[in-house]
Image (spheres, helix red, strand yellow):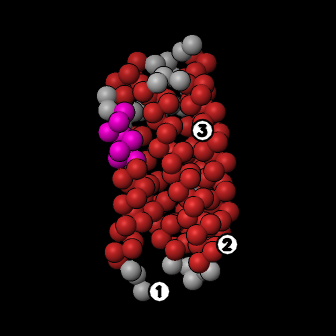
Amino acid sequence: MKIRWKRLLLCLAVPLGAGGLSALLTRGSMEAFEELQKPPLSPPGWLFPVVWTILFLMMGLASYLALESGGSPREIGRALRAYGIQLGANFVWPLLFFNLGAYLAAFAWLVLLWLLIWAAALRFRRLSAAAAWLLAPYLLWVAFAGYLNLGIYLLNR
């Protein structure tokens, strides 16, 4: 498969841009996060941006593989819509959690996000197994984030 570099870079830039904008809107949040009581297994704060950067790159690569799969325009469109919806939901979660401190609402939003990621992965699977598998670590991380989010809600109310 010939790599279409402009398309690949755009596919990578979209989730990185969404994550970057979300991070910009939640600036200073890690200081407040460090003050919260956290459940066991909570990773250090510096790990979150590292993991999210890797996950955003994997999402972008997954979207590129779906786009370049050779599937029908209709299936590609459906997959990319599902992908875009979950990316929009991903963008909202830090605003709920960090900016609003709405920990229970943020947890409910994470459950919705997990379901949306699953739906996007199923759509991607119809086009490219590799694209679907690239979303697996994202699903696992969001499940772990749900554990952390619910733990923070319970420990800090």
Q: Is residue 128 visible?
A: no
Q: Position of residue 123 (x, y in %)?
A: 65, 65
Q: Which residue is mark 2?
A: 126
**In the rendered image, which quarter is residue 54 located in?**
bottom left
Judging by the rendered image, the residue that carries numbered circle 3 is 110
Q: Which residue is mark 1?
A: 1
| Amino acid under disc 2 | Arg
Q: Which mark is residue 93?
A: none
Circle nearer the N terminus (3, 1): 1
Which residues make up the magenta segment?
19-26
Q: Earlier in the sequence, mark 1 or mark 2?
A: 1
Q: Amino acid at mark 3?
A: Leu
Mark 3 nearby-residue class (10 Å; few <14, some 14–19, many ≥20)? many
- Secondary structure predominantly adopted by residues drawn in magenta: helix
- In percent of width and height, residue 116 lies at 63, 50
**Rounded to the nearest whole Å, what is the CA distance between mark 3 and mark 1?**
35 Å
Image coords of residue 47 (percent x, y)? 40, 40
Q: Is residue 17 left or right of residue 78?
A: left
- The secondary structure type at the circle numbered 2 is loop
Separation of marks 3 and 2 at Cα, in angstroms: 25 Å
The residues bearing labels 1 and 2 have C-alpha atoms spaced at a distance of: 18 Å
Residue 21: say if magenta. Answer: yes
Residue 78's spot in the image, x, y percent?
62, 66
Front one among 17 and 30:
17
Residue at figure coordinates x 49%, y 39% from the top left: 92
